[in-house]
Amino acid sequence: MARRALLSVSDKTNLVDFAKQLKDLDFEIVSTGGTKKALEAGGVEVTGVEEVTGFPEMLDGRVKTLHPKIHAGLLAKRDNADHMNQLKSAGITPIDLVAVNLYPFKQTIEKPETTEAQAIEQIDIGGPSMLRAAAKNFAGVLTIVDPADYQPVIDALKAHRDDNAFRKHLAAKVFRHTAAYDAIISNYLTEEEFPDQLTLTYEKQQSLRYGENSHQKAAFYRNPIPSQLSIITKQLHGKELSFNNIKDANAALNMVSEFDEPCVVAMKHMNPCGVGTAETISQAWDEAYESDPMSIFGGIVAVNREVDAETAEKMHKIFLEIVIAPSFSDEAFKILAKKKNIRLLQADLSHRDQPDRFETISVSGGMLIQESDHQIDQIPDFKVVTKVQPTEQQLKALQFGQHVVKFVKSNAVVVTTDTKTLGVGMGQPNRIDSAKIAIQKAMPKDGYENAIMASDAFFPMDDCVKYAAQHDIKAIIQPGGSIRDKDSIAMADKYGIAMVTTGVRHFRH
């Protein structure tokens, strides 16, 4: 007895060859609209779905397969005699295989010119209904949602290996696919910032060599709707990325994107160890490297300009895990690619002014979601709270320090000039320890007399200001807002330090 297969796909990849192989296995092919035309053009004999239902397509194709003769044929339990008798009485033929992929909703909304009305027309109704019905009854129906599964299904049918485990695998893939499809639609239509139900979906980009540590398995999943600031556009060279590589690369890329001038960011363990700006990317590299020549070793470097040969020669002299840039000149690429394992990543910074609005963090039993911190504190917003006014150069340094400190793990204190970091103190349980680390790292460096100190949160007492004053810091920027602000201000006045407040805290836990 011939088996029946229903094919209805928007992606016609390998469709005709698949259908011909099904015909060779004695399947009757039932199809709809464009799929039917493609099959007939390929020389495949096809039964139109309207011949099965006795109903023509309606409403511009919105209604084709929503009919008992389709869904009963999918849902009837093959081992249930009553179900099979009902099919026989109604003249309904069971459907044994369904291959469906859905209207291209995601691809449609990715186009900037797409209107809401155009997007809505690409919401598939019949396709998910057939897939879910078939997948629910996977014991009797093979369900295919991915053209990559055509050949495995053919091979399994030929070898009689289409057992329950194989069918269950395909059914699970269907439910993942339809759930992701619905999630993309719901997120597109949702206007609330934090809806009562939030469904997110991600697509597997790659398996990773290991997680944070070598005994932990890991994989990288990407949001199927590309963010405006993508972590990685393309890997051009080097070995596979690790879990930690991707986290550090993301942090470095987000940080370097805040700077308009040529900038180099060196990142280690999710914290910047060197940040430099200058008129050229080569000079910016010098500034970043001089910030901490020891810690940059084995680091992740992100730049916001093309890497030229001059910069590449400097980078090549030390061990770097990753270099991320909008592009590499041909000569720069040849220089850096001499090292087999260095990862060279090309990142798209063209939409850096439209970054992701929200960020998510996994916690035990759930997930936190918040607006991303895109606040950029500008000099006109600074409030001078001390008797001493900051100089023009100090104001530039204070703004530079503010750019940096918001990307340092809290408690965060940094010491910088107007073009580079001198010392970074991070992750301490109290602010004075972070201040001490930053200042002690900065002390031996040239240009220290022009240094400022930036803090990601207010000073709970005046000890950080006193320690800064004792080490010749001449200007400080901090959010303010402590009940003891007056003590810190008084200490700054005592030592002739200029202090500005921003009113904005930048914790990064």
Image: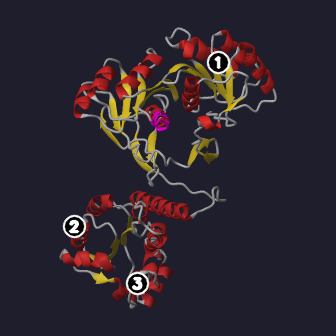
Inspect the image, locate mark 3, and give the three-letter code of the amino acid beneath it.
Answer: Asp
Kindly indicate whether the residue at mark 3 contacts the one at mark 1 (C-beta within 8 angstroms).
no
Query: Was residue 356 drawn as part of the magenta stretch in this picture?
Result: no
* Res 2 visible: no
Q: Residue at x 51, y 26 (%)?
A: 272
Q: Residue at x 62, y 47 (%)?
A: 369
Between residues 298 and 357, which one lies in front from this camera angle?
357
On residue 454, which mark appears?
none
- Quarter of the figure with the N terminus: bottom left
Q: Looking at the image, is mark 3 or mark 2 earlier in the sequence?
A: 2
Q: Which of marks 1 and 2 is nearer the N terminus?
A: 2
Label 1 CA crowd tier, 10 Å (few <14, some 14–19, many 20+): many
**Residue 106, horizontal then vertical, whole percent:** 43, 62
Q: Mark 3 points at which residue?
A: 60
Q: Where is residue 372 shown, x and y percent of the image?
A: 58, 44
User: Which numbered tag is attached to residue 435?
Assistant: 1
Amino acid type of the residue that numbered disc 2 sits on in the rendered structure: Asp
Say how many tags the image has.
3
Q: Give the residue type at disc 1.
A: Ala
| Nearer to the camera, 264 or 191 | 264
Q: At which x and y percent is residue 256?
A: 46, 34
Is 256 within the magenta?
A: yes
The 10 Å Cα crowd at callout 2, few under 14, some 14 to 19, many 20 or more, is some
- Which segment is the magenta one? 252-260
Query: Tag 3 or tag 1, which sits nearer the N-term?
Result: 3
Q: Residue 17 carries which label?
A: 2
Residue 367 horizontal side relative to residue 245, left or right: right
Q: Do the residues labelled 1 and 2 touch (CB within 8 Å)?
A: no
In front: mark 1 or mark 3?
Answer: 1
Quadrant housing the C terminus: top right
